[in-house]
Image (spheres, grey):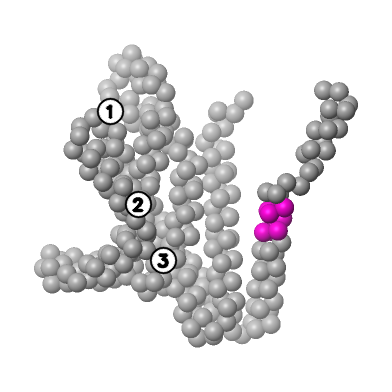
């Protein structure tokens, strides 16, 4: 590369594109919001200090709800993904209908359907000893979130399994391994590595989407924020909640990037 070409490359690299300008503007906006929240807390410490522990408890409820939902969804996603890739029509069709419903309808509609809709069948659920599940808003949100994320995780896993080169399976067969051993020792580990980034995106989406639980009186971070606002009528409570969500998401994103780098270090050259 000659000197003029090198200079042109540097000049082009320094040009502020629309994406960069937008990023700078959003960063500046978040800095202003953070400064506004910090000023509000400092100027009225007695009020915000009183509710800080409540906000932390709400954030803990959010993380608990999302964490358990993701674990249950991960367990359900494996048989769903296998059914979606099955050569048998019936399991493939049933899995398709499940995934299509939960991915094609809003999470808030699913939450209302379970919490308010199933609540109309109290006598039946009491008879089968399941009313304890549908009378508690936390358990209802946990059920809906688990079923919802299972559908998304199943599609992520299905695509990742399909992305594993066919030669890996053929190599396992050549070594005399059983189909079950080939799947769990060769195909699934590689598929999980491929699915790392989409899984991280799904976790972030679930954290932000968990605010829907507050609508059915689950006192997660957003639920505690709404309760605090109803007592103070201070919009800064929502600003503080937004910043806490931002901190959770950004922390998770950085941890996930480090995890991805750790697990895929053998692929770097």
Q: Compared with residue 151, is residue 33 higher up or lower down, i.e. above or below?
A: below
The tag earlier along the polypeptide, 1 or 2, is: 2
Q: Residue at x 38, y 32 (%)?
A: 161
- The alpha-carbon separation of the residues under discs 2 and 3 comes to 17 Å
Look at the image and give the residue range highlighted in magenta.
Answer: 21-27
Q: Nearer the viewer, mark 1 or mark 2?
A: 2
Secondary structure of the residue carrying tag 2 is: helix
Q: Compared with residue 65, is residue 269 higher up or lower down, i.e. above or below?
A: above
Q: Residue at x 72, y 52 (%)?
A: 21
Question: Which dot marks residue 97?
Answer: none
Assess disc 2: are there few (<14), some (14-19) or many (≥20) residues with their C-alpha within 10 Å of its C-alpha.
few
Image position, residue 196 (x, y; %):
48, 40
Question: Which dot marks residue 104?
Answer: 2
Secondary structure of the residue carrying tag 3 is: helix
Q: Nearer the viewer, mark 3 or mark 1?
A: 3
The tag earlier along the polypeptide, 2 or 3, is: 2
In the rendered image, the quadrant that contains the C terminus is top right
Assess disc 1: are there few (<14), some (14-19) or many (≥20) residues with their C-alpha within 10 Å of its C-alpha.
few
- The alpha-carbon separation of the residues under discs 1 and 2 comes to 32 Å
Question: Which image quadrant for residue 212?
Answer: bottom left
Image position, residue 140 (x, y; %):
30, 65
Assess disc 3: are there few (<14), some (14-19) or many (≥20) residues with their C-alpha within 10 Å of its C-alpha.
some
Answer yes or no: is residue 228 visible. Answer: yes
Disc 3 marks which residue? 212
- The alpha-carbon separation of the residues under discs 3 and 1 comes to 40 Å
Image position, residue 67 (x, y; %):
41, 56
Question: Which dot marks residue 180?
Answer: 1
């Amino acid at each position: 590369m000659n000197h003029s070409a090198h200079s042109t490359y540097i000049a082009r690299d320094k040009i502020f594109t629309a994406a960069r300008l937008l990023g700078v503007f959003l960063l500046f906006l978040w800095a202003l919001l953070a400064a506004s929240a910090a000023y509000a807390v400092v100027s009225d410490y007695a009020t915000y200090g009183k509710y800080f522990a409540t906000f932390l408890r709400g954030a803990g409820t959010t993380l608990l709800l999302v964490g358990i939902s993701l674990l249950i969804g991960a367990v359900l996603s494996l048989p769903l993904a296998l059914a979606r890739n099955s050569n048998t029509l019936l399991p493939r069709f049933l899995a398709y209908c499940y995934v299509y419903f939960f991915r094609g309808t809003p999470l808030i509609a699913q939450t209302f359907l379970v919490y308010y809709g199933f609540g109309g069948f109290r006598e039946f659920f009491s008879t089968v000893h399941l009313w304890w599940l549908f009378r508690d808003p936390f358990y209802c949100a946990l059920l809906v979130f688990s079923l919802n994320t299972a559908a998304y995780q199943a599609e992520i896993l299905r695509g990742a399994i399909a992305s594993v080169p066919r030669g890996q399976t053929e190599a396992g067969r050549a070594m005399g391994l059983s189909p079950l051993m080939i799947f769990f020792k060769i195909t699934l580990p590689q598929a999980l590595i491929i699915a790392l980034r989409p899984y991280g995106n799904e976790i972030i989406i679930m954290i932000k989407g968990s605010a829907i639980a507050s609508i059915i009186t689950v006192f997660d971070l957003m639920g505690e924020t709404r309760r605090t606002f109803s007592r103070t009528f201070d919009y800064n409570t929502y600003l503080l909640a937004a910043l806490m969500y931002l901190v959770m998401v950004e922390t998770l994103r950085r941890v996930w990037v480090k995890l991805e780098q750790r697990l895929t270090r053998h692929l770097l050259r």
